[in-house]
Image (cartoon, rainbow, N blue to C red):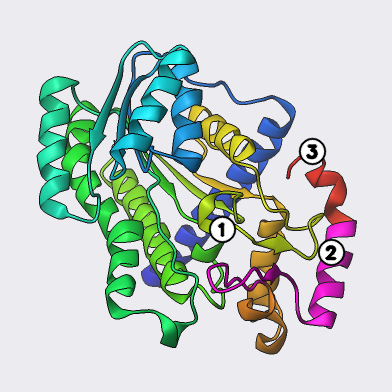
Amino acid sequence: MSINMDVITDISVALGKILYYFLESLLYKIIPKTKKNVAGEIVLITGAGSGLGRQLAIHFARLGAILVLWDINQEGNTETCSLAKENGGEKVFPYTCDCSNRQEVYRVADQVRKEVGDVTILINNAGIATGKFFLDIPDHMVEKSFLVNAISHFWTCKAFLPAMIKANHGHLVCISSIAGVCGINGLSDYSASKFAAFGFAESLFFELTMVKKTEVKTTIVCPHFINTGMFEGCTSKYPFLLPILEQEYVAKKIVNAILEEQVYLMMPKFLYIILILKHDLPTSASQSAEITGVSHYTQPQEICFLNTKFNRYCVLVFSVFSPFFKGAK
């Protein structure tokens, strides 16, 4: 009897929390969440030498953060450093680092702690993609994809998380992808590594909550494909549903999510509907190979819905819910 009562109690508490967080989210739709001040925070961005990493650096420079820029490309990283200083960054420290190399990550991390201080906001952004079908991917590139896109997160977090936990202050940011929540043909290695990055970040979030280090925040970002060199040549068959996102827009959304301490960020918001449909529709209609397809290195290919019934269902659902997604690409 006591076991049954415990189960009932746990279910009641869970339902109560679900209702509470649902009402809280509705409240924040009406009253914007207070944004934290990051002036003086030490922000480390991996993959800062170009693309999204560069845009994030520029945004944080404008907010008065101390920037630590990591990239394997020294020339690109130096250029980002200059741009950050032009945009108000007074303290910007570029470091050449191969995030796929554990020893190098730990070595450069020690150097950062000595020369700059303890990192308080860690943005794991570095990423690579091969853009080939599974059997065409060289073995070393499969390994490289996992090392850069996922395993490097283990090393950077091991290097900088202890200081955050000790101070009960910090923020871990994982840049995953739509490919980290939906398998995508032509990107098997990239997709698998982004799933791994998402799972690692989410697990850390739960661990930090369990040990009551609630002031060490987590933000997990899953954008649709971004207009960078990594996905050059990609187009979207239905851009009003799944547009190719611009770097500036994505960077702005990510920074805002960090400032509001948002745990999950998906762009565009239609991705939330895709995730619901993926789990609720029959397998034949919800296979992610029928949602998106990319093979940008071999030849530009449209990202599109291939299943007609599934596509019509998505459009119908989007039409019904569109009032809730206005202005939220």
Residue drawn at x 62%, y 79% as measured from the top left: 289
Q: Earlier in the sequence, mark 1 or mark 2?
A: 1
| 21 inside magenta stretch | no
Magenta residues?
A: 292-319
Q: Is the residue under label 1 in contact with that under label 3 (CB below 8 Å)?
A: no
Which circle marks residue 327 in the picture?
3
Query: Residue under circle 1?
Result: 231
Label 3: which secondary element: loop
Task: Pinpoint residue 52: horizontal percent, then vertical percent.
Answer: 50, 41
Q: Is residue 232 above or below residue 78?
A: below
Please give left or right for residue 77 compared with residue 317 in the image: left
Q: Earlier in the sequence, mark 3 or mark 1?
A: 1
Residue drawn at x 19%, y 21% as measured from the top left: 116
Label 1: which secondary element: helix
Q: Is residue 151 above or below residue 328?
A: below
Label 2: which secondary element: helix
Q: Is residue 197 above or below residue 280?
A: above
Q: Is the residue under label 2 in contact with that under label 3 (CB below 8 Å)?
A: no
Say which of marks 3 and 1 sits in front.
1
Disc 1 marks a residue whose amino acid type is: Phe
Residue 193's quadrant in the figure?
bottom left
User: Quadrant location of the N terminus?
Assistant: bottom left
Which circle marks residue 317 in the picture?
2
- Pick whichever, 96 or 210, lies toward us: 96
